Amino acid sequence: MNRTTRATLAVAALGLALSGCTGSTDEDPEAETKATPQDTWAKSLCEGLAPTTAVIDPPATEGADVAESKEAIVTFLETLQERLQSQAGVLKDVGAPPEVDPAAYKSARKSLKAGASTLDGVIDRLKQASPKDASQMEASLLQVSETLASSASYQGPLAELSASDETLKTAFENNDQCKMIMS
């Protein structure tokens, strides 16, 4: 595997990795009584999403043999896929935001499902590539890289929902855990 292929894959994978970290749950108790329905919904959503947003580093494949690199990349992509599926599940469990057009909610769920489905296809293609055939492996990694690069701009359900409604954007900005996820 050449460096360009590895670097391209790493960059594309980094773009897809949903980074973030969990924030403090110590919030002002009076704020709870002043919370809008969107604030309450955002808090619930971000609490559910927090476990799915820890940073995942792409695998270090430099110096590893092709079979080991392939396995490490597959494991990394499977982790990303599981995260997207978990986030879709959290979004479904929390339900649509109150007093907001449900179209954005449906779109965010669809984006997460589409991302997980894309990764499923990428993983299958990579698993089928023979590590003993360098040209096949390189072609497969190039395909993986191109697929990931085309979807690397997706910033996650909070960004998608924020862009659709000002009250949700404000609710996410007012919640420390949501801010941590979005950063």
Image (cartoon, rainbow, N blue to C red):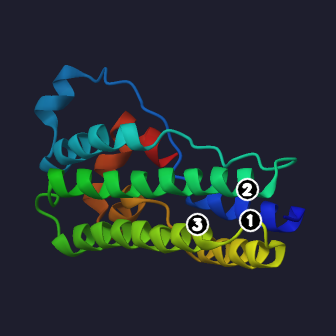
- Of the residues shown, which amino acid type is indicated by label 2? Ala
Q: What residue is disc 3 on?
A: 127
What residue is at 16 percent from the left and 30 percent from the top?
A: 32
Rendering coords of residue 40 (x, y %): 17, 42
Instruction: Tell me if residue 5 comes above or below residue 52 in the rendering.
Output: below
Q: Label 1's element?
A: loop
Rendering coords of residue 138 (x, y %): 78, 73
Residue 33 horizontal side relative to residue 60, left or right: left
Q: Label 2's element?
A: helix
Instruction: Say which mark, if any, is on residue 67.
Output: 2
- Of the residues shown, which amino acid type is indicated by label 1? Pro
What residue is at 25 percent from the left and 50 percent from the top?
A: 90
The answer to whether residue 153 shows anywhere in this view is: no
Q: Nearer the viewer, residue 104 or 147?
A: 147
What residue is at 49 percent from the left and 38 percent from the top?
A: 54
| Lower sequence index among marks 3 and 2 | 2
Gap in Å between the C-alphas at discs 1 and 2?
A: 5 Å
Q: What residue is disc 1 on?
A: 131
- Of the residues shown, which amino acid type is indicated by label 3? Lys
Residue 154 horizontal side relative to residue 110, left or right: right
